[in-house]
Image (cartoon, helix red, strand yellow):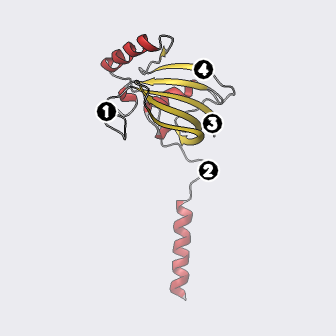
Amino acid sequence: MKKHFLLLVAAAAFFVSCKKSSGSSCPYTESSFVAPASEQATLQAYINANHPGAIQHSSGLYYEITTPGSGTVTPGVCSTVLVQYIGKLTDGTVFDSNTTGVSFTLGQLILGWQKGIPLIKKGGIITLYLPPSLGYGANQVGSIPANSILIFNIQLMDVL
């Protein structure tokens, strides 16, 4: 009986010590990464030919804001965002989508999303044109070829 009591106390102490504190800090930090000039030049050529109204971000991605959204909250890398999106390659091939809404912590996503989503607020719609290094880089991911320019149409449904 005494053994079981000690095990119970030890287990309770373990679970209490593992409880997250309400003031826990965010494990993510904002990246200052900028896409290499060669990737920016390739993306710029694509933008000039296909989306001349897109704006270049300091990171090297391009974007077009369809709807800026509203509210006072701007998502950051520690924010959980609820989004609908469609991801395409430059030839129009859709490689991923979610049209019902899915939530992510922004800091867990590719750099292009970390840089682009904070450009809009809740209800906003943005198209991101990402150079490879702000997407999946030199890695093939599923049906996405290595070193691909990625295009995402994103609606920021909420910042949680």
Residue that mark 1 sits on: 146
Residue 120 in percent (x, y) is at: 59, 25
Looking at the rendered image, the disc whose residue lies closer to the viewer, 3 or 4, is 4
Kindly report the distance in space between the C-alpha atoms of the residues bearing marks 2 and 4. Answer: 37 Å
Q: Quadrant of residue 31?
A: top left
Per the model, the C-alpha gap separating discs 3 and 4 is 18 Å
Kindly report which numbered mark, 1 or 3, lies closer to the viewer in this rendering: 1
Give the number of the mark in front: 2 or 4: 4
The amino acid marked with disc number 2 is: Ser
Earlier along the polypeptide chain: callout 4 or callout 1?
Answer: 4
Residue at the disc numbered 4: 66
Residue behind mark 3: 159
Disc 4 residue type (three-letter): Thr
Q: CA distance from mark 1 to mark 2?
A: 41 Å
Query: Residue tagged by mark 2?
Result: 22
Q: Position of residue 132 (x, y in %)?
A: 36, 28
Hey, which residue is sitting farthest right in the picture? 71
Count of numbered labels shown in the rendering = 4
